[in-house]
Image (tube, rainbow, N blue to C red):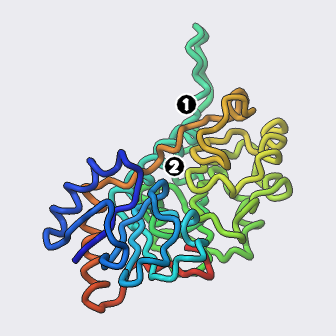
Amino acid sequence: MKVRFSAREAAWAEWAPALRAALPEMELAREGDPAAFDAIIYAPGGDIDDFTPYRRVKLVQSLWAGVERIVTNPTLTQPLARMVDPGLARGMAEYCTGWALRAHLGMDGYAQDGRWRTGAVPPLAPERPVTILGMGELGRATAAMLGGIGFPLTGISASGHPVPGVTVHPVAALDAVLAEAQILICLLPDTPATRDLLDARRLSLLPEGAWIINPGRGTLIDDAALLAGLDQGRPAHAVLDVFRTEPLPADHPFWSHPAVTVTPHIAAETRPATAAPVAARNLRRALSGQPVLNLVNRAKGY
């Protein structure tokens, strides 16, 4: 099995040992005759833009959960699989849980300024509704962790599949769900249907004091509408890990807005130790003619 590795140069040293350990029968290379490769391991920033010469390739395995940077490539006709990494899912769940607890407990209300503040007693977790937009792998992992604490959970799901411990609604019910979302966690993919989904009208539906936590995709929220909403207190605060332009420009108003917390796209990383076995299993399936796991639906974009 000959596999082409196409990712940023710095990724090679980290990924190659893990991939070779997980798939010892593989010949992993960074370059070579395109017609000689059986599969491609891909991440944005790699050196393949034209997939046409890779005629033998039976699978392009993405190292990222998001595939919006490759799925629209017109030369890509080979099967494409997104990465579903248990380490990434746990990392995302921990990020969302940490910030949800910060919002829930009002941790930002205790400035270290010498004032003794009393009287602000938060409700217990079972009294604080949390809403998750997107009930895929990351949404389910986040729900499992938050549910263990006791938060009542509501989810928006395009598929409508049931999720244990979550009241799942279709996208058509989004407006009604937003009106009850005291903490809103956004984990939707970047597709034409989700871009600017949270516009001025929908942001205005959030209850007073609501927080938004967005580690999903920067295109989900209308930036100007969010800033205007924050100025009016709906939402009360936004924790943003993803942006339309990354790195976020130094002069972007998100940096200076008092109701915005910017984190530098660190909510969830694909970890070679947990992701390499996932890639290895999928490559073996593809090369042996078995159905590929986590195959991307080109029409849906994920």
Horizontal and vertical percent position of residue 57 = 37, 80
When asked about the image quadrant of residue 21, the answer is bottom left
Which residue is painted at 30% across and 90% down in the image?
A: 290
Q: CA distance from mark 1 to mark 2?
A: 15 Å
Q: Which residue is mark 1?
A: 107
Left or right of 86 in this view: 108: right
Q: Residue at x 49, y 78 (%)?
A: 52
Residue 276 or residue 93, whichever sits in front: 276
- Is disc 2 surrounded by few (<14), some (14 to 19) or many (20+) residues within 10 Å? some
Q: Quadrant of residue 167?
A: bottom right
Judge by depth and name the residue closer to the eye, 78 or 80. 78
The answer to whether one can see residue 223 in this image is: yes
The residue positioned 32% from the left and 53% from the top of the image is: 271
Task: Please provide percent x and percent y for residue 237.
Answer: 68, 39
- Hey, what amino acid is under mark 1? Met
Task: Tell me the SS state at disc 1.
Answer: helix
Residue at image point 33% right, 62% down = 31
Is 224 on the left-hand or right-hand side of 238? right
Write down the residue under mark 2.
125
Locate residue 70, reporting x and y percent.
54, 67
Kindly identify the amino acid type of the residue bearing the numbered disc 2: Ala
Asked whether the beta carbons under mark 1 and mark 2 sit within 8 Å of each other, the answer is no
Q: Is residue 104 above or below residue 82?
A: above
Quarter of the image that includes the C terminus: bottom right
Camera-side residue of 180 and 133:
133
Q: State the image coordinates of residue 204 (x, y, percent, origin top left).
A: 83, 52
User: Does residue 129 show up?
Assistant: no
Question: Is 251 placed above or below 22 here?
Answer: above
